[in-house]
Image (tube, coloured by chain):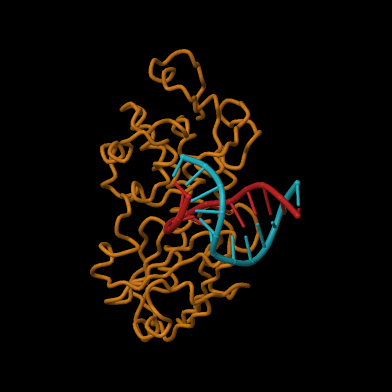
Chain colours: A orange, B cyan, C red
Amino acid sequence: MPELPEVETIRRDLERVLCGRVLERVEVHEPRLLQNVTPAELTAALSGRRLEAVARRGKFLIFVFGAHSAVVHLRMSGWFALRPGGHTRMVWHFRPPLYFDDVRRFGTLHLVSSAARARRPPLAGLGPEPLDEGFTVEVLARVCRGRRPLKNVLMDQTRLAGIGNIYACEILHRAGLHPGRPAQTLTQTELEGLHRAIREVLDEAIAWQGSTLGSAAGDYRTLSGARGGFQDRFRVYARAGAPCRGCGTAILGERLAGRSTYFCPRCQPARQAAALRGRACSRSRAR
DNA sequence: CCGAACCTGTGT
DNA sequence: ACACAGGTTCGG
């Protein structure tokens, strides 16, 4: 469920509400959540500790408690809330308590040393942060080496951290690039446009507090239980058959690398030749 | 590269 | 009953 904008929204809320508070006790109700510690070890490491910071790396949330950090991935249906939900897998007894809810039980928690966490699993090997200052067009050009389809590259966490299926689709539409386009064929101008689209889409989605697709159990919610707002601004995701907001052409829904992929065949032409020579396809770009 | 698996719920 | 879901990992 959650990609970078959703995780960042949760991070900001957690930091505001819980930073500086002491974790008195940990309750684990789903043993599979813990990847490299036992419940007893987790409790021993964190009980009585003050939450110093809540950070984010890609789609991971990082809770910093002094020398130890708890690194959590929400996967498909995990979320943190201040009230217990229907599938509580863990409770952190701050005042107020923090509940981890996860219908599908895919969520993970690693306990790592704060000093070494960037060099240890699960954070080691993640690609650059797309919203960091250091993420330049040159860095993106390096990310785009190889012939793999652009959408796969954007979603590859070892190439670029934090982008998933929804935002890959939205970014490619904004950049006017076909999802199946071999990554290394992008021109300098296209790389610049893609770089801008990545920043714009992620920034906007964060400003709207992420995307909540439906209202099912496990659908993304903010810490206080509110829905995100960016789903109403989708230009392509889950809009197969609907008119492109830029040119009116029906949005296509296809299966790419096993994932639902949505794009506008006119604004995101498959043939790069047209884009390169700047003719043939007199498309009116989505504004 | 693809599909299956991990789980549960929802929508057709 | 069956397909599908924001993610990741594994095996063929």
Location of residue A224 in the rendering, given as x and y in whole percent from the top left corner: 55, 67
Location of residue A121 in the rendering, given as x and y in whole percent from the top left corner: 32, 64
User: Which residue is found at the position 46% from the left and 22% from the top?
Assistant: A271
User: Which residue is found at the position 42% from the left and 35% from the top?
Assistant: A149
- The relative height of residue A267 versus residue A277 in the rendered view (above or below) is below
- The relative height of residue A80 versus residue A146 in the rendered view (above or below) is below
Pick the front one: A23 or A2: A2
Residue A58 left/right relative to A164: left
Location of residue A237 in the rendering, given as x and y in whole percent from the top left corner: 57, 41
Q: Residue furthest top?
A: A280
Pick the front one: A200 or A143: A143
Residue A179 left/right relative to A183: right
Pick the front one: A197 or A163: A163
Location of residue A168 in the rendering, given as x and y in whole percent from the top left corner: 47, 42
User: Which residue is found at the position 27% from the left and 62% from the top?
Assistant: A118
- The relative height of residue C6 versus residue A141 in the rendered view (above or below) is below
Quadrant hosting residue A39 = bottom left
Count the labels in the image: 0
